[in-house]
Image: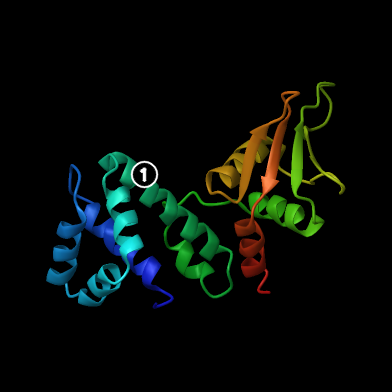
Amino acid sequence: MDPFAFATIVGLLATFQSGREGKRDIEEFKSWLEENNHGNMVSIIENNNNMQRQLTAFMNQNHDQVMSQLATLNDLMVSIASHMQGLGNIASSFAHNSGLSDQAVDVLRQFVVSGSSKMQYMKNNSGEGNDYYILYGAPNINYSEPRFIKDDIDSLVKTGLITMSISLKNNIIYTITRQAVRFIDKVDNK
């Protein structure tokens, strides 16, 4: 399969869905693709039964949900591209994207480089200093903008680069994902 087929199909699906209210089905999407000279994408979809099922399931969601997920994916792609050499300037032209801040990427980099699989949030109740993000078996996460750290961590969770859970003792635990490692590898040109 074409290595860019996923991005192409998702982009075309977003274009197809935008400006249309209500649910659309896979047959309408394929017809629209044919009308807009994307017959090769129709062939890719028709030759993959699993893709047809997954596209149908995705399109059967509430329209606002579909558009929200597509917008989130777009923001994530722009965020990733903005940190890649050669694509950064192109991505920066999409000013509406809030993306991942430099601090969020730096926090993620520290998490990945540490080799740790988990990070715990620790509130600093002393009134002095910042809250802590403690990596299991590694030094604490360093960050320079305490005012925005929660937002940065939340953006990493929202994009699926880390996951959040609550321990039996009600501690907030963050877990690294494979996507995070791949993301940092791409950003650092490895």
Residue 135 spot, x, y in % from top left: 81, 44
Image spot of residue 32 (x, y percent): 15, 64
Vertical placement of 146 versus 30: above or below? Answer: above
Taking depth in this image into account, of 112 and 25 the one nearest to the observer is 25
Pick the quarter of the image with the C terminus: bottom right
At label 1, counting other C-alpha atoms closer than 10 Å, the crowd grade (few under 14, some 14-19, many 20 or more) is few
For the image, the number of numbered tags is: 1
Q: Is residue 123 above or below residue 50?
A: above
User: Considering the image in quadrants, where does the N terminus appear?
Assistant: bottom left
Residue lying at 12% horizontally and 70% vertically, measured from the top left:
35
- Tell me the residue at 81%/26% (across/down): 124
The residue singled out by tag 1 in the image is 68
Picture coordinates of residue 188 (x, y %)?
Answer: 68, 69
Relative horizontal placement of residue 59, taking residue 129 as reference (left or right): left
Residue 121 image offset from top left, x and y in percent? 74, 34
* Image position of 132 (left or right of 35): right
Q: Is residue 98 above or below residue 151?
A: below
Considering every residue shown, the one lying at the far front of the view is 49
Q: Is residue 113 left or right of residue 17?
A: right
Q: Residue at x 79, y 33 (%)?
A: 130
Colour option used? rainbow
**Residue type, label 1:** Ser
Where residue 48 sits, quadrant-wise, is bottom left
* Residue located 29% across and 60% down the image: 52
- Between 131 and 174, the one lying in front of the other is 174
Q: Quadrant of residue 109?
A: bottom right
Determine whether the residue tagged by mark 1 lies in a helix, strand or loop: helix
